[in-house]
Amino acid sequence: MSDPARRRLPPVHAVLDWPGLAGMIASEGRGATVRAVRTTIDRAREALAGGRDHPVDVETLGRLAEASLIGERPRLRPVINATGILLNTGLGRAPLAAEAAEAVDRVVRGYCNLEFDLESGERGRRTDGVESLLVSLTGAEAAAVVNNNAAATVLAVKALAAGREVIVSRGQLVEIGGSFRLPEIIESSGARLVEVGTTNKTRLDDYARAIGPETAALLRVHPSNYRVVGFAESVGIAELARLGAERDLWTIDDIGSGALAPGLPPRVRGEPTAAEGLAAGADLVLFSGDKLLGGPQCGILVGSREAIEPVRRDPLMRAFRVDKMTLAALEATLRLALDPARAGSRLPLWAFLDARPADLLGRAARLAGTFRSEFGLDASAVESAAYLGGGSAPLDPIPSAAVRVGPPFPASSPSEGAWARSLRLGEPAVVVRVQGGAVLFDLRAVFEAEDARLVEAVRRTARGDAARL
Ligand SMILES: *Cc1c(COP(=O)(O)O)cnc(C)c1O
């Protein structure tokens, strides 16, 4: 202990008392935090003993200990979504119903009859069960399920139009987050894209004139996260399907977010539904399982037997097939959807859509009261606007409520950005909206049962304040 640099290292308790570590002590436990601090100090001592430079101040050592604790957590962790975006791809899109999670749990811990018919004792098809549910829910003749809607689009275009032409309106050549770009999707499926109309206006006649001997399909794509408003015109699926039928072409309808039918889920207006696309005459309707359906990530194709059969036989089907966990969750989700009254409360996304703004405001007022009285924060309940997200209904705000917290923020994270970061690094992580110098906890996508955990999350970040007082 003769080296002066070594003597300058603070003791473990001094680093533990750094207010920034209060949240870690609360979430990871005192024992784990003490171990992390000890290891951090040991490393610093070794560095200094080896003649290397190393910071010795309490704050830097505290931050290093915090980083090592965070590094030990599983990469994929639960998050409380206080952003007000219901289908946030960054946050895993739709939360699953308890029934869906239980269905996964039931089949993954042992073997299951994934591709085995228990009655005949012979090989079965893995998607039989979900396909018959999809048929009942949408009125389709047949259905198929793949990994996501991007795969469904590639497969549909490949199976029905490879080597030939697919006609798409210029107003629908969109990019939908996560690098889903329609022209590239069509190209990768081996079909040739024929663009018609203009960005803002495409008429039926534009499609009709583009049809030639090489044409195989007409494709409508729901622009999802993008809208052409004002001087605009597009062709409805019924008109398009009528033209397709007259000219003996496939009509494919990529509706994206995938409401099943009007009212499923409740309170969603202006989004195309699978049942309506089929009733209008589309041969195939494509949508995601983890958007408005509120189920697991997958791509769903519903349509006529004639259109689904080539999709099923395509070799790419094997590459895009879904696993048993997805199928278990999807089957449970679809069973709930068969009973809309029950689904409205059991499917989290549907329940979030259905929540009354007055009830959300009541919860926000109670939380704001707790934030004020227990943590001395400048918190109030405010009306806010939530959004579906995930590329759905970009222009339709959903009336919501939030807890708004203005400065001063807790001393250990004095700016709104720093406080938002502390909340993200807690356990569970809380993701908030930062807006106009304030932090907003929007409650539209927060389970009521999570309100108490929100209070705990704020308590952890505010604990440093108490230590300082
Ligand atoms: C979201 C979306 C897709 C992509 O679906 P994934 O399930 O994310 O692959 C494709 N088309 C439309 C119209 C969409 O909205």
Image (tube, rainbow, N blue to C red):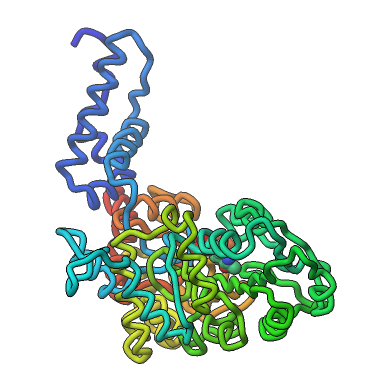
Placement of 319 over or under 11, stated as above or below: below
Q: Quadrant of the N terminus?
A: top left
Residue drawn 32% across the image and 31% down it? 61
Placement of 266 over or under 291, stated as above or below: below
Using residue 175 as the reference point, say whether residue 167 is left or right of it. Answer: right
Q: Where, by quadrant of the figure, is residue 250 drawn? A: bottom right
Number of numbered discs visible in the structure rendering: 0
Q: Where, by quadrant of the figure, is residue 155 drawn? A: bottom right
Residue found at the far bottom of this picture: 341
Placement of 194 over or under 331, stated as above or below: above
Using residue 211 as the reference point, say whether residue 314 is left or right of it. Answer: left
- 143 or 42: which is nearer to us? 143
- 202 or 101: which is nearer to us? 202
Q: Position of residue 423 (x, y in %)?
A: 38, 55
Residue drawn 51% across the image and 66% down it? 310
Residue drawn 22% across the image and 48% down it? 28
Q: Position of residue 430 (x, y in %)?
A: 38, 59
- 203 or 194: which is nearer to us? 194
Q: Position of residue 422 (x, y in %)?
A: 39, 51
- 458 or 227: which is nearer to us? 227
Is residue 376 among the parts visible in the rendering?
yes
